[in-house]
Amino acid sequence: MTNRKHFIDELNELNHKAIEMGRQVHDSFRKLIVACESQSLELAQAIVEQDKLINELEISINVDAYLLIARQCPVASDLRRTISVLKISNELERIGDYAVNVARYIIKTKNNNEPFLKAIIELATLLLDMLDKIMTSFANEDVQLALDVSESDEVMDNKYRSYIREWIKLAKTADEAAVEEAMRAVLIVKQIERAGDHVVNIAENIVYLVNGKRIELD
């Protein structure tokens, strides 16, 4: 096996691990939606456990990527590809952490949070669609699909701001327990909104991967 073929095989393995990582993160948010719908503590705990696998995949990608760079001294285009996979795996790990934070909210909630679950489900569903698009974009190196994700994030941001305004109004008239739960819900939907920002970061890295140009998608 030539050095070049060996390098390509190792780089392809990095890509496969990143795609698997994306599948696991996607599955975490799918479970999260079901956990919110059913208020299942068992499913919420499964999301926390699943995060260990996501973290292990990121560590594996980091180790393999740095060894690949050290051994092969890749040319500029190959180095760009390797660094892009590193950055994308880091973003996916952060997104997975947000799923865990929401899952722990479900586990620890004692007051009535049903009025806020609808918002969590709606935003998580939007995020699930963004994750599906971004991982398809990465697998196919589809720049246009990556750019489309930025528009989806804008929809999520608008929904997020709408819920925050609604809950601020609620806090002015509700009893203490409802106000406390509303404030906790504000922090949780912020987690999902931030996850959307990290998906946009992945989109930026895909554009860089394909075109070699750094852009900022707001």
Image (cartoon, rainbow, N blue to C red):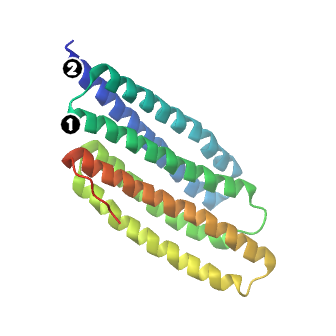
Q: In the image, what residue occupies the spot 23% across and 33% down? A: 78
Q: In the image, what residue occupies the spot 52% across and 38% down? A: 54
Residue 145 on image: x %, y %: 27, 56
* Label at residue 5: 2
Can residue 124 be seen in the rendering of this structure? no
- Residue 111 left/right relative to 150: right
Amino acid identity at mark 2? Lys
Q: Residues within 10 Å of mark 2 (few under 14, many from 20)?
A: few
Vertical arrangement, residue 12 with respect to residue 113, above or below: above
Can residue 63 be seen in the rendering of this structure? yes
The residue furthest top is 1
Vertical arrangement, residue 174 with respect to residue 152, above or below: below
Q: Which residue is mark 1?
A: 77
- Secondary structure category for the residue under label 1: helix
Residue 188 on image: x %, y %: 61, 63
Residue 83 on image: x %, y %: 33, 38
Label 1 near label 2: C-beta < 8 Å? no
- Which numbered disc flags the more N-terminal residue, 2 or 1? 2
The residue nearer to you, when weighing 152 against 209, is 209
Vertical arrangement, residue 79 with respect to residue 136, above or below: above
- Secondary structure category for the residue under label 2: helix
Quadrant for the N terminus in the image: top left
Residue 139 on image: x %, y %: 29, 42
* Label at residue 98: none
- Dot in front, 2 or 1: 1
Q: In the image, what residue occupies the spot 42% across and 41% down? A: 89
Amino acid identity at mark 1? Ser
